[in-house]
Amino acid sequence: MLSRRDTLLTSLKTAFGLAIGASSPLGTLLTSPAAASDRPRSADWAIPFGAAIRDWPFQNEPAYRSALIAHCRQIVGEGGLKWADIRPTRESFVFDQPDRHMAFARQNGMEMRGHTLVWYGAMPEWTKTIGSSTEAERELVGHIETVMGRYRGRIKSWDVINEPIPDDPASRSDIRPSIWQQRMGEAHIALALRTAARIDPQAQLVMNEYDIEYVGDRFRRKREAFLRLIRDLKLRNTPLHAIGLQGHLRGEVAIDRDGLSAFIAEIRSMGLDVLVTELDVIDNKLPGPPDLRDAMAAARAYDFLQAIQTVARPKAILTWGITDKYTWVPLWFKRTDGLANRPLPFDEAYQPKLLMRVIEHFAKDPR
Ligand code: G3I
């Protein structure tokens, strides 16, 4: 009779062709029985762990706040600092949500990251009326001055630029369409970074992207286009301090470990740091049984974090939510079998999953 461990490892092999040795670090992580140490206390981890917070449960569910306090040294608003949340009209700035998140972070000795100042997504309707490059420049600079000015010295790391590269770049010079790209061209990126550096010279300025980590031509071309943009910005001494790898991992797609490590090595060669900013595992194409699915998700995250850490220690690892109970994944990747998605480190009952063990493995005392 196969042990539970061997059943799991055999299923991973059968389902995903993943040959994981029972005594390998990953094999041990995935199969060692749950122990008291599973109550992860990230306070003393070498790499800070954190999570994106969703405002409704943050305000209405004590268990949600307790989980954040117990496990996170950093938080970031899943929303709240996006244009759609802050700028309902051209004249107004609404800071209620980020202010309460900031107060919570301060009360609990946490850092709060800023997400995000320049993004094609979550833009209020009125920005579609921005009709010229002069008007676009005035609005973008004014927004960064006001938002970063308010949290100067309190938000120490900002996703200034989010998702600048299209999903399937036609060429290395391809930039994702947005009102800013439309009105100012690629120059809007350097303008935003220079403005951010002027408003808060101490802040870590980050450019954040996804789909950088996979095997496949499209993803290789996305890495190359992203590297072209980063090199050009550095060549012109544009203030940029780190690259954020979102890490929304597609459970069914293999990580290009060599491609990702080479990407990180190039980033490091330009003196830039690396952060993991939105880690979760999109599991709509993974098999149903939760323990097999969780093991597969954890194995993907292991490959991803190992490929990064082979070259550089991330400055932080944040997941895009803390519990499977509140996640964006079903918004776009709902399972067809009616089962709930399980993308995050804690399950719906706030119990740690194998994914949290893998994060702990890489964050606690990175090799
Ligand atoms: O708050 C309104 C609510 O009042 C309204 O009733 C409801 C129905 O339309 O919408 C609610 O707003 C939603 C908001 O999330 C808050 O939950 C928006 O429609 C919805 O579009 C928004 O989705 C967020 C999305 O970014 C767009 O801002 C997701 O929660 C959030 O997880 C997702 O996060 C992005 C990162 O910023 C960048 N990287 C990818 C990541 C996942 O897509």
Image (spheres, rainbow, N blue to C red):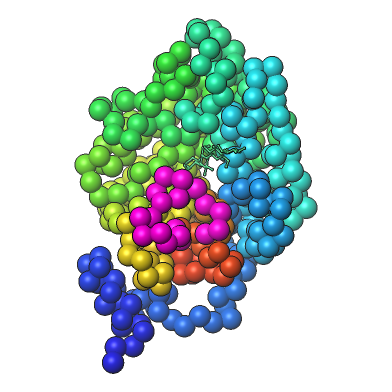
Q: Main secondary structure of the magenta part?
A: loop
Question: Which of the pair 362/61 is nearer the observer?
Answer: 61
Inspect the magenta stretch and tell me whether residue 172 lies in it. Answer: no
- In the figure, is residue 293 to the left or right of 254? right
Question: Which of the pair 94/288 is nearer the observer?
Answer: 288
Instruction: Locate residue 68, reporting x and y percent.
Output: 65, 58
Instruction: Locate residue 77, reporting x and y percent.
Output: 61, 43
Inspect the magenta stretch and tell me whether residue 335 lies in it. Answer: yes
Residue positioned 36% across, 25% down in the render:
175
Q: Quadrant of residue 335?
A: bottom left
Q: Which quadrant is home to the C terminus?
A: bottom left
Q: Quadrant of residue 203?
A: top right
Residue 307: tell me if it is visible: no
Residue positioned 61% across, 48% down in the render:
54
Instruction: Locate residue 267, reporting x and y percent.
Output: 39, 42
Which contiguous range is marked in magenta?
A: 324-342
Residue 119: tell me if it is visible: yes
Q: Quadrant of residue 228?
A: top left
Instruction: Locate residue 60, reporting x and y percent.
Output: 71, 53
- In the figure, is residue 115 to the left or right of 314? right
* 116 lies above or below 274: above
Residue positioned 55% across, 75% down in the render:
38
